[in-house]
Image: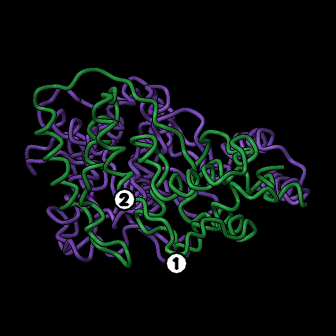
Amino acid sequence: MRMTTIGGAVTTLLLAMGALGALHGCATAPADDAVAARAAASLKSSFAARGQAGLQRLDQDETQKLCSEYANRPLPASVAEKIQQANLATIRYPADGKLVGDWKNGEKIAQSGQGFQFSDGPSLYRFGKLRGFTDETRKYAWGKVYNADAFSACSNMPRFGHSAILTEQQLRDVVALLVDPGSPVNQ
Amino acid sequence: MRKVAAIVIGIVAAAVGGAFAQSSTVDEIAKYREALQDGNPAELWEARGEEMWKTPRGPKHVSFASCDLGLGPGVVKGAYAALPRYFADANRVMDLETRLLYCMVNQQGISEADATKVKFGDGSARRSDFEALAAYVASQSRGVAMNVRVDEPHVHDMYQLGEKMFFFRGGTHDFSCATCHGEDGKRIRLQDLPNLTKTEGAQKAYTTWPAYRVSQGELRTFQWRLNDCFRQQRFPELVFGSEASIALTTYLAGRANGADYNGPAIKR
């Protein structure tokens, strides 16, 4: 049972990180921008606010806009760089400098399905062990969970910190699941 | 049904048993689905829909015999496999549900508010006419090759719009349809997700809807399928019959062209 739980946590966490979308396709048609603009407007008129999900969720930020535009064709290096720089600038570290929380809570967050719903990103198995249990690894893990687009533009992984999906403490706990030597991920 | 119950118990027992690799669970679910195809409860919705189709309804006491799904008034054979399509009388591209609504309002005299009171059933007393009618109409395209006229200008326009929407990333989690349906081997928990950017993935997925969902005890239409995808994407609620719903349906139905329609299917 213990093994099942740990296996589940690791699997779920794998889902969390998400892969860089495979980007391929062909060149843009001239009218492509016009179609994209019409699609965005049409979506706006096709949805209704319900509960916590308001229509503002259809307002794309620059990252979402660019990542949609290049979703089925190669992402130029210059655009990727622009996206990563913009997202890197959003990462906030906790005021008290404490990046690592409790991996047991992190495991619960990973299991809860909140923002961790889809599958098969790169393996996170031994995330900390492979990178070394250093300040650098902890800082990287924090940034990656906070805003994955800062490191790989148009990642499938949600920007858990930037988009306020997880609280600061939840981020700490998920980071702990990745980098704590005692975490099942690093066994 | 007894065979079905035995399989369900078998799966539950196996899952509770614990040491059960995911791949073999997927195999078991595949077997379970296969076994269920023989006694698909969708037939109950098809029968109810057929009855409804043939019975005079609404203030004008008119049946669907005058409803043109694209192949002529009252013709259901093969109609679903060619939807969505452009309807000159409504001057818009319509999927099956919006066309049914059009007939209810314009021919049977039912108000739109009344007609759309129950868009999706709850698996119990709250039943949707759309789900029953869709099951019946779709069943009459079984074995018919999908042939959505994507070269027709209005349909082509919707198809292009739908394609853009498929890749539109938004919401709190930056999800688009393609996030889950743009690569092979994706799953939500144990549910394998079709890669709709590939022809065979789109064909296999689209041709099985509408479908009976065992977990909900309900027959679900493609409007429901899209609505629930967007819920999981953390988007606001997709409006029934909205332009986006038609555009996405057109895109996915068009991508399924050439494959035999094979629904209503049964899903977990």
The total number of labels drawn is 2
Instruction: Report if residue A24 is visible in the image.
Output: yes
Residue identified by numbered label 1:
B125
Which lettered chain is shown in green?
Answer: A
Helix, strand or loop for disc 2 = loop
Chain label for disc 2: A
Q: Where is residue A3 drawn, in percent x and y?
A: 88, 55
Position of A12 with respect to A39 (left or right) is right
Helix, strand or loop for disc 1 = loop
Chain B drawn in what color? purple
Q: Which quadrant of the figure has residue A18?
A: top right
Q: Where is residue B91 drawn, in percent x and y?
A: 8, 48
Q: Nearer the viewer, residue B140 or B24?
A: B24
Could you classify mark 1 by the number of other residues whose Cα lies within 10 Å: few (under 14), some (14-19), or many (20 or more)? few
Q: Residue at horizontal 19%, vertical 47%?
A: A39
Q: Residue at horizontal 20%, vertical 71%?
A: B112
Q: Is residue B200 above or below residue B217?
A: above
Position of A125 with respect to A66 (left or right) is right
Give how far apart the Cα atoms at labels 2 and 1 are. Answer: 50 Å
Q: Residue at horizontal 70%, vertical 59%?
A: A177
Residue identified by numbered label 2:
A90
Q: Where is residue A102 drawn, in percent x and y?
A: 72, 70
